[in-house]
Image (spheres, rainbow, N blue to C red):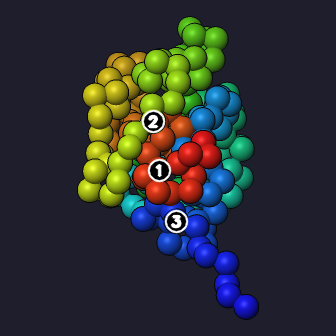
Amino acid sequence: MKAPPQRRRCFWAKSDILIAYHDNEWGVPLHDDRALFEFLVLEGAQAGLSWETVLKKRENYRRAFDRFDPAKVARYDAAKIKKLLADPGIIRNRLKIAAAVTNARAFLAVQKEFGTFDRFIWQFTGGKTKRNRFRTVKDIPARTPESDAMSGELKRRGFTFVGSTICYAHMQATGMVNDHVVGCFRRDEI
């Protein structure tokens, strides 16, 4: 008996954790504010590291950062930050942890102004998923005019660790853009 044919996936989905993330989350349009905040924190934590490293620590992040409740994270003080810096379950980088707290405060200000963070962030793709037609990894940009605009506006509003490359990764993760390559089984499912 033959084994069933393997589904064609994007080039980066190699390990079990990356395959599960690719098949179930990456590129799926996300409109829940708490989940959007989670990805904002995780994308900032990933800077300079692999996404696989962050995914392996994701449950620890959820525990350490109060399930990504931005109202709670915004109230973190020096004692809480010190505790986070001692937590081996997360990436213990002082600047990245401080950015999560700073970004929680800015996130709440955006929610207050726009009603939801979702309403604010999705404006950078006109409120809908931008569907790209990339064929190879070489075709996929690290940043776009939309991610440049998002980065600039987030920085203007006091966010940190939100460079254009991080913003583009956020757009990919949360389905603002569909960058599943042509031939990937998820491209047409989303």
User: Separation of disc 2 and disc 3 at Cα?
Assistant: 18 Å
Specify the quadrant of the image occupied by residue 32.
Answer: top right
- Which callout, 2 or 3, points at the residue further toward the start of the chain? 3
**Residue position marked by numbered label 1 in the rendering:** 180
> SS for tag 3?
loop
**Residue position marked by numbered label 3 in the rendering:** 8
Label 3 amino acid? Arg
Label 2 amino acid? Arg
In this rendering, would 43 be left or right of 134?
Answer: right
Q: Is the C-beta separation of discs 1 and 2 under 8 Å?
A: no
Residue 152, percent from left and from top:
31, 24
On screen, residue 179 above or below 93: above
Camera-side mark, 3 or 1: 3
Label 1 amino acid? His
- Which callout, 1 or 2, points at the residue further toward the start of the chain? 2
Residue 87, percent from left and from top:
60, 61
Image quadrant holding the N terminus, namely: bottom right
User: Separation of disc 1 and disc 2 at Cα?
Assistant: 9 Å
Q: Nearer the viewer, residue 113 or 172?
A: 172
Q: Is the C-beta separation of discs 3 and 1 under 8 Å?
A: no
Specify the quadrant of the image occupied by residue 11.
Answer: bottom left
> SS for tag 2?
strand
